[in-house]
Image (cartoon, rainbow, N blue to C red):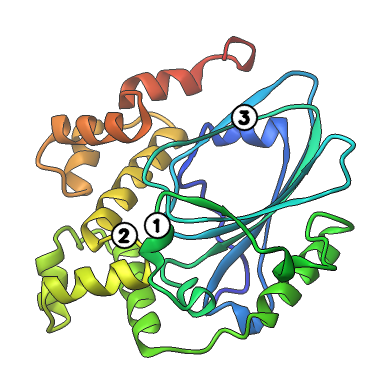
Amino acid sequence: MRHQPRGDSRGILDPRRLLREVRFRRRLPAAALRPYVELYWLIDWELDEPFEQRVLPHPAVNLVFQHSGGDSRETAEVAGVGRELFRITLTGTGGVSGVQFRPGGFRPFWRRPVAELTGERRPLAAGLVAGRRPCAGTDDERCAALDDLLLAWNPRPDPSTAEAMALAEEIRVDRGVLRVDDLARRHGTTTRRLQRLFLDQVGVGPKWVIRRYRVQEAIEQAAGGPVDWAALAADLGYADQAHLVREFTAATGISPTAYARSLSRPASAR
């Protein structure tokens, strides 16, 4: 089990600008929650000009608590797996405390098929957050409020959840996982069963998870410096460079080379 939250910027378009414009931190949840929760993410901002952030979502559910301006009230919502590029424009002052679950990790809290939430953002029932202020106080206090909230939901271990989370993690870390039927054979099961398992536990099918992690890896590589796109396409299992370009552009709305050029421009020109 990790003792530090992951440090990659997968899915964040222009991560260096994000760190210039806002205070962004990641924290681990309480030990009892770590089988299900990837990390807490905390953001605070004081902006003179509007700032648009773009994120290609992970195959994961998030809880999002936000306040802005002088309003002491917080909004709370459950964000299912997002299939499309997520854009948000931040203005003035505000803060967010977020919970990113592991792919499949929200199922023990939700206790219903997670596909019901895919592509949706739903207000969190007031009774689930009454008396708690996940956006108030120090980072430790904010994380403690999130811990209390999630522990009160009393998640229960489930073999299907554990299987789905393990398979999703295998897809994330093993670049050799390129096809669902290969993954099914590796684990002595069928593609149909994996499809049902992922829709119930993760919210999207395993093929979608494979494709999303590959595009996120390409974004991460582009943000890190010059890229040999043909070599990267082969490394990530695309048929050729054109295949990578099509999927990258469809997911982000910009071609890989245009994206890489945008990161090299001075901050004042973006």
Q: Which residue is mark 2?
A: 204
Which of the two residues, 265 or 140, is positioned nearer the viewer here?
140
**Residue 196 visible to the viewer:** yes
Mark toward the viewer: 3 or 1: 1
Quadrant assignment, res 261:
top left
Mark 2 vs mark 3: which is more N-terminal? 3
User: In this view of the protein, which residue sits in the foreground, 176 or 127?
Assistant: 127
Q: Position of residue 153 (x, y in %)?
A: 64, 80
Q: Secondary structure at mark 1?
A: loop
Q: Position of residue 155 (x, y in %)?
A: 56, 84
Screen quadrant of the C terminus: top right
Amino acid type shown at disc 2: Val
Mark 2, secondary structure of its residue: loop
Q: Residue at x 46, y 47 (%)?
A: 10
Where residue 268 sits, quadrant-wise, is top right
SS label for mark 3: helix
Label 2 – label 3 distance at C-alpha: 30 Å
Residue indicated by mark 3: 17
Label 3 neighbour load within 10 Å: few <14, some 14-19, many 20+: some
Question: Which residue is identified by label 1?
Answer: 59
State the residue in front, 179 or 80. 80
Residue, x 30% and y 57% (percent of image)? Answer: 209
Contact (CB < 8 A) between labels 2 and 1? yes
Q: So how many labels did they put on this image? A: 3
